[in-house]
């Protein structure tokens, strides 16, 4: 039984990387705007459709389509921030939830109207490929998703730490009014943060197109775990999202094999609750983060 | 002024009544949005063609048929839409619903109001175990589908693997909704009865994003034959992760749903060949169909392809077949939308096997029967993906080809 452990750990880490990838944008938007974007999954779904069509019509590889789709979704995100998010930025939480949830319903049904309910898939030379190391098989598509997730998380953390806009964003999160008095254009930064958050969803969508079916409600199934991961890692913490993703991924895979495939999500959720009992702010979150700041 | 308003109202009411007299209004309840939208729409498109064909031939007893559709995307929605159709729209006859969970919710409302519920797609056994007088199901049950999968393993697969069932390990995996559980339980029980070494029955959530643990358990079980009831992404994950993790089996049987859809074939390319699928099929041997059933099927397929730009799947065909019988046999015979007459006409139906375009006959189990309202002459068939297409390989009297690729070639040779 134990000779399978390395395989289980590798498989768990790989899917954990995917969870991290799905979570970064969500935690970024929460960290910067204090808004839980319930439509995040739909941006992933839109990117998946984009990657699917670019592949179906012009044979563009889903990984290459990242460079086409991400800027488009980034722009779209800025527009949506202006129309949907900005008016509710200081509204009660319930209203914010309705707004982003409504956005998700609209996007889902737009996809249903444009592209129909069919399950679409992209087949490339690497879709079911794997690398064998010793007696461990490493799925190529999951490995790429894993690597991209860490690359993207690192890039975002560096951006927030060192760039001028990144510093301004952190200042804005600490104190919105003080920042704007110091000449920080908070409207522009909000747009930037939301655009970037959904652009991360776009990257995730393109990366996942060779793994999953693309259909109008694809985002719903993908994003559920991401919400857990974001809270586990600490709301607004990018590093936390990655660590949280890995923990959930490994837990699910181990319990799925040794205990029950059906209960693997439940057991991961129990672990999630236990961790929150000890660290209510999440693994890498700071106490009161939902009020104050992000890392 | 008041009188004028009353007169206008009366006039409006009479025109409305007159209009209502001109057509048969039938409720059509399918999931048209949300996660079940694909097959819900496919089912409805099949039903629409049945209505068109009936109307072009002059309707039923001189009146045209009109479908009043409702979107039953979730059980809650199914219930409220059934309420709307039966009270606000005042419909006595409702057809649907593709998914068993939705059918449970919607048919309760219709039964309580004394109407007729005509199920063309939901297969959970329990639907016809409720003793409802107005519930009729044209399609086969989950149990018969699961049993067929196990029978296929014993009759067609075991001999080709050169072994007896007692020397073969069989593993059942399934998504854990009502559909997957009931099909898989029936398959498991039948497989045990047939003497297979059953390594277990592993449920999982259809919404899962990773099935490496399931696939590794398949490998650890040493299974020769896998029977799987899946929803969508899970089916794709199982196949792709089996390939990635190098898990090879002698045969793989899916039990309908995604396994019979073109999307499944497209997502796997050549690797789909050899996978079995048990459900209904319009590709059964035409010689087993009556002349009328053959003609109707050809006409339906032509129309579906013209309007949808793709050939109908089994699900679209079952929507067509079920609705066509409802209109052409039950409603025509009853001559009235009165539920009591409709129910009597349904119970009196006696269509021999081969009389419908899916090869089924129609004879409903009557009151007092444990499966009241179940069509006793419907049956699933076993198909196999061969050269990228599904062909019927069992049972003997309806098959068009023999099973091939047993044992399944290893992944690196597919």
Image: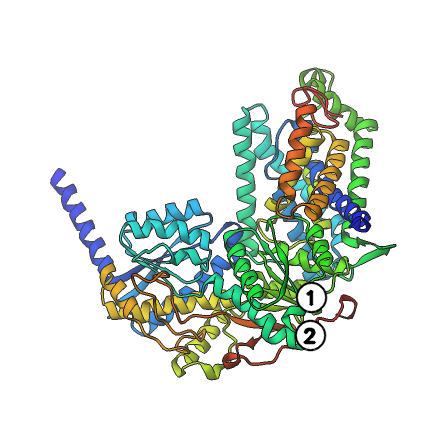
Note whether B124 is above or below B63 in the view shown: above
Quadrant occupied by the C terminus of chain A: top right
Q: Provide residue B322's location: percent of width, then percent of height.
A: 39, 67
For disc 2, the chain is: B
Task: List the residue tagged with mark 2.
Answer: B161
Neighbour class for label 1 at 10 Å: few (<14), some, many (≥20)? Answer: many
Mark closer to the chain start, 2 or 1: 2
Q: Nearer the viewer, residue A16 or B337?
A: A16
Measured Cα–Cα span from mark 2 to mark 1: 9 Å
Q: Count how many numbered circles sit on residues in the image.
A: 2
Specify the label residue B224 is tagged with: 1
> Which picture quadrant has residue B363?
bottom left
Q: Nearer the viewer, residue A116 or A58?
A: A116
Does mark 1 fall on the same chain as mark 2?
yes
Q: Can residue B45 be seen in the rendering of this structure? A: yes
Q: Of helix, strand and loop, which one carries label 2? A: helix
């Amino acid at each position: 039984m134990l000779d399978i452990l390395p395989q289980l750990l590798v498989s768990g880490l790989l899917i954990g990387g995917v969870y991290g990838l799905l979570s970064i944008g969500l935690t970024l938007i929460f960290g910067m705007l204090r808004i839980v974007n319930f439509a995040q999954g739909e941006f992933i779904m839109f990117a998946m459709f984009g990657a699917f069509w670019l592949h179906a019509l012009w044979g563009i590889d889903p990984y290459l389509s990242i460079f086409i789709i991400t800027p488009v979704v980034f722009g779209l995100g800025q527009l949506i921030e202006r129309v949907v998010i900005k008016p509710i930025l200081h509204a009660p939480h319930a209203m914010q939830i309705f707004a982003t949830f409504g956005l998700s319903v609209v996007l889902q049904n737009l996809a249903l109207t444009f592209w129909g309910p069919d399950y679409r898939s992209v087949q490339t030379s690497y879709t079911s490929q794997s690398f064998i190391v010793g007696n461990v098989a490493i799925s190529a598509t999951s490995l790429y998703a894993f690597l991209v997730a860490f690359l993207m998380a690192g890039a975002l953390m560096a951006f927030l730490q060192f760039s001028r806009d990144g510093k301004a964003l952190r200042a804005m999160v600490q104190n919105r009014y003080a920042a704007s008095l110091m000449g920080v254009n908070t409207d522009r930064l909000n747009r930037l943060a939301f655009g970037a958050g959904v652009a991360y969803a776009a990257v995730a969508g393109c990366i996942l197109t060779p793994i999953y079916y693309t259909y109008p409600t694809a985002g719903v199934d993908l994003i559920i775990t991401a919400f857990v991961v974001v809270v586990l890692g600490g709301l607004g913490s990018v590093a936390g999202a990655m660590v949280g993703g890995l923990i959930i991924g490994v837990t699910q895979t181990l319990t799925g094999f040794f205990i029950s495939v059906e209960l693997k999500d439940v057991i991961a959720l129990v672990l999630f609750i236990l961790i929150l009992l000890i660290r209510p702010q999440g693994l890498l979150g700071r106490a009161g983060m939902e009020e104050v700041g992000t890392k | 002024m008041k009188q004028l308003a009353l007169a206008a109202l009366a006039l409006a009411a009479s025109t409305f009544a007159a209009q209502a007299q001109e057509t048969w209004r039938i409720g059509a309840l399918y999931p048209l949005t949300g996660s079940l939208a694909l097959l819900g729409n496919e089912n409805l498109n099949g039903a629409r063609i049945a209505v068109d064909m009936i109307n072009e031939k002059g309707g039923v007893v001189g009146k045209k048929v009109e479908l009043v559709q409702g979107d039953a995307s979730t059980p809650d929605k199914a219930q409220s839409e059934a309420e709307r159709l039966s009270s606000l729209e005042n419909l006595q006859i409702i057809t649907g619903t593709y998914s068993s969970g939705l059918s449970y919710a919607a048919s309760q409302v219709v039964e309580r109001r004394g109407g007729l519920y005509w199920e063309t797609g939901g297969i959970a056994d329990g639907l016809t175990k409720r003793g409802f007088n107005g519930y009729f199901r044209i399609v086969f049950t989950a149990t018969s589908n699961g049993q067929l999968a196990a029978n296929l393993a014993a009759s067609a697969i075991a001999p080709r693997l050169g072994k007896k069932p007692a020397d073969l390990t069989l593993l059942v995996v399934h998504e854990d909704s009502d559909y997957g559980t009931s099909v898989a339980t029936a398959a498991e029980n039948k497989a045990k009865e047939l003497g297979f070494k059953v390594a277990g029955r592993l449920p999982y959530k259809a919404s899962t994003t990773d099935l490496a643990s399931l696939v590794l358990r398949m490998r650890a079980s040493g299974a020769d034959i896998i029977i799987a009831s899946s929803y969508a992404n899970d089916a794709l994950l199982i196949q792709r992760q089996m390939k990635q993790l190098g898990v090879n089996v002698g045969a793989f049987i899916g039990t309908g749903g995604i396994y019979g859809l073109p999307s499944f074939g497209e997502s796997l390319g050549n690797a789909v060949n050899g996978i079995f699928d048990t459900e209904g099929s319009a590709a059964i041997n035409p010689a087993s169909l009556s002349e009328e059933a053959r003609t109707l099927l050809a006409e339906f397929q032509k129309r579906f392809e013209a309007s949808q730009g793709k050939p109908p799947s089994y699900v679209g065909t079952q929507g067509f077949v079920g609705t066509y019988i409802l209109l052409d046999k039950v409603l025509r015979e009853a001559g009235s939308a009165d539920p009591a007459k409709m129910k009597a006409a349904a119970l009196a139906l006696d269509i021999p096997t081969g009389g419908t375009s899916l090869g089924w006959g129609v004879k409903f189990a009557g009151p007092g029967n444990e499966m009241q309202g179940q069509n006793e002459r419907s049956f699933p068939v076993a198909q196999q993906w061969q050269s990228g297409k599904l062909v019927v390989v069992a049972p003997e009297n309806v098959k068009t080809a023999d099973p091939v690729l047993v044992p399944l070639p290893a992944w690196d040779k597919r």
